[in-house]
Image (cartoon, rainbow, N blue to C red):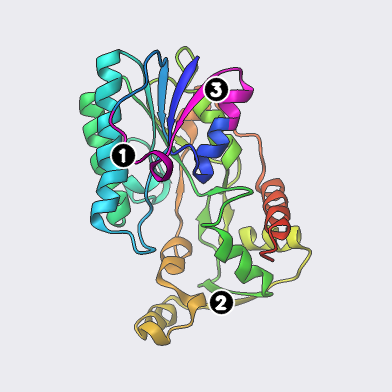
Amino acid sequence: MKVFLTGATGFIGSYITKAIEEAGHTVTKHSFSSHGHFSKLPPDMDIAVNAAGRLGGQGATTEELQEANVHLPLVLCKECREKDIPLIHLSTPGVTGLAANAKESDPYDPMGEYEATKVEAEQKLLKNCPDITILRPDFVFGPGDMHKFPLFKQIHKGWMPLVGSGSAKTRPTDVRDVADAVLKSFPGQPLSKGIYNIGGPQVLSIKELALVISVAMGKSVQFFPIPRFIFKLALMFGPFCPKALSKSRYNLFGMDRFSNTDKSFKKGYKPTRPFSLTAIETVIWYKDQGLI
């Protein structure tokens, strides 16, 4: 198969590229940084995969979020519809607020501007490309990921603040399991057409997650449980608040946020990589890069 892939040079996109090529298909890569705005599909493509996206924060503007998360997939949808080829779109469980055990059928409830653009894209794609496959990967980890590096760096310091007791649960997902899910979404495969949460085989508490990472580093970590009201109070001090007590950390680690993967599981998709292995491989990559 000839596959057109947007976001090909990104963290997840690079793993999707590798998985597709190892499966014997050819990939035509597109990235905004290398090729600019997407406008036209190359001829003779059999399928398109959209792994492009712009996360919120880090100076991202509303216009950048709209361009990457809404405009690009809609142009790609139009091209796929006109050429009658299937489209696989990567979204996020955050579109439903990512409450505990969130299901694909839960109502939209975006947490922030990034998630709101993903909601807008999903709604318009489902209307204009009814046969689309939408994958919602949960809390993705793996070698090469710089978005989770601050978490590893904090644990490497030997201490970590916890919101409350650190019992809030999450579902860490290996990036290679996400790439496998894309392959499972190709025509004739079990995840072809529909919306599917994609997540790792384990649901861990934040404390358990941090302990796994500390073991992978060969370091001990000291936990500092901080009551929720004190955590929130500290955030009110703005620039005087310690970086370890960030708002994003509170939002991510302060309550149960994991998706329900029963739907994809029943369709025959099974993630195979435990977080303990992912953590070891990720730590090795950080060390090879001289980051820790």
Location of residue 62 in the rendering, given as x and y in whole percent from the top left corner: 24, 56
Horizontal arrangement in the rendering, residue 280 relative to residue 161 (left or right): right
Q: Would you name the residue on which mark 3 appears?
A: 268
Residue 247 against residue 113 in the figure, above or below: below
Q: Dot 3, how many residues are within 10 Å of its Cα: few (below 14), some (14-19), or many (20+)?
A: few
Type of amino acid under label 2 = Pro
Location of residue 18 in the rendering, given as x and y in whole percent from the top left corner: 60, 31
Horizontal arrangement in the rendering, residue 287 relative to residue 194 (left or right): right
Label 1, label 2: how far apart the Cα atoms are: 46 Å
- The mark found on residue 37 in the picture is 1
Q: Secondary structure at mark 1?
A: loop
Q: Would you name the residue on which mark 2 appears?
A: 225
Q: Going 73% across and 52% down the picture, which residue do you hit?
A: 280
Type of amino acid under label 3 = Gly
Q: Secondary structure at mark 2?
A: strand
Horizontal arrangement in the rendering, residue 229 relative to residue 287 (left or right): left
Say which of 236 and 163 sits in front.
236
Q: Quadrant of residue 70?
A: top left
Q: Which one is earlier in the sequence, the residue at label 3 or at label 1? A: 1
Q: Are marks 3 and 1 in contact (CB under 8 Å)?
A: no
Magenta segment, which residues?
18-39
Q: Dot 1, how many residues are within 10 Å of its Cα: few (below 14), some (14-19), or many (20+)?
A: some
Say which of 168 and 125 sits in front.
125
Say which of 185 and 201 sits in front.
185
Discs 1/2, front: 1
Q: Secondary structure at mark 3?
A: loop
Magenta-colored stretch includes residue 25: yes
Q: Residue furthest front?
A: 35
Location of residue 266 in the rendering, given as x and y in whole percent from the top left corner: 50, 25
Q: Is residue 203 visible?
A: yes
Location of residue 73 in the rendering, given as x and y in whole percent from the top left corner: 30, 34
Label 3, label 2: how far apart the Cα atoms are: 39 Å
